[in-house]
Amino acid sequence: MRRLPSDLREVLKKPLGKIVSPQDAEPNGIVVGDYSAYVLISNGKMPRMVIHDNRIMRENADETIQKAIKGFGNLVFKVKNPPGHISDEAEDIIKIVLEEGKTNVRIEVLGEEDLLTLPVILHAPFGAKIYYGQPDVGLVEVEVTESIKRFVGKILSQMEEIA
C-alpha cells in the first residue's frame, strides 16, 4: 500500500489533462468518481469502467446518483482503499481488468477512490481516455500517453510504501 505524502498533494491539485464538457467526453472511457460517472452515464457516454466510492466531495452521494451508478456494470468488484492511499488490492484489480480488456466494469471502493486515477493511468493502454472530476474546476480528460505514464510513475515512486 502507498500513502500520499503531504508535499505531493499540491502537485495533484492541478488537472492531469484538459477540462472538457460531459457532452464532449468520449464513450468507452474509464471514469473515476461518482459525480463524473453519473454525469457521463446521464449524457449517454457509457464508460468502459467506473471506479466510485458512493461519495461526492466527502459527502454521501444522493440516491439518484447512487442508483444510476449501481445500475452500471456487468462485472462488479468491491475493494478497500483508505483515503490518501492506493491499496495493493485496488491497484491489482485495476491492473487485471485493464490487462484483460474487460468492459462494463464497476469497481466500488470502500474508503476513497480519488488517488486511483493514478494506477488507472499507469495500467491503461495508450490512447485510453480517463475522466475524473477536479473540485471547483470540472471534468478532466486524460489521454494516456508515454509522457503522462512517466509523470504518474514518478508520483507513484515518491509515495510512501507502508505495510
Image (spheres, rainbow, N blue to C red):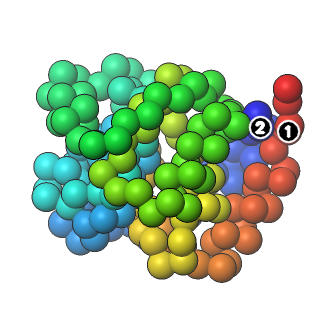
At x 57%, y 25%, the residue is 80
The image shows residue 63, relative to residue 147, as above or below, that is above
Inter-mark Cα distance, 1 to 2:
5 Å
Q: Position of residue 83 (x, y in %)?
A: 61, 27
The image shows residue 93, relative to residue 97, as above or below, that is above
SS under mark 2: strand
Q: Amino acid at mark 2?
A: Arg
Residue 137 shows in this picture: no
Give the left or right position of residue 43, taking residue 102 as reference.
Answer: left
Residue 81 shows in this picture: yes
Residue that carries the numbered disc 2 in the rendered image = 2
Location of residue 47 (image quadrant): bottom left
Placement of the N terminus among the 4 image quadrants: top right
Near-viewer residue (12 or 152):
152
At x 37%, y 36%, the residue is 76
Q: Position of residue 147 (x, y in %)?
A: 67, 78
> In the rendering, which numbered label is found on residue 145?
none
Q: Amino acid at mark 1?
A: Glu
Q: Position of residue 10 (x, y in %)?
A: 68, 48
At x 19%, y 36%, the residue is 71
Near-viewer residue (34 or 10):
34
Placement of the C terminus among the 4 image quadrants: top right
Q: Earlier in the sequence, mark 1 or mark 2?
A: 2
SS under mark 1: strand
Specify few, some or many for label 1: CA neighbours under 10 Å numbering under 14, 14-19, or 20 or more: few
Give the left or right position of residue 126, taking residue 135 as reference.
Answer: right
Label 1 close to label 2 by CB (< 8 Å): yes
Residue that carries the numbered disc 1 in the rendered image = 160
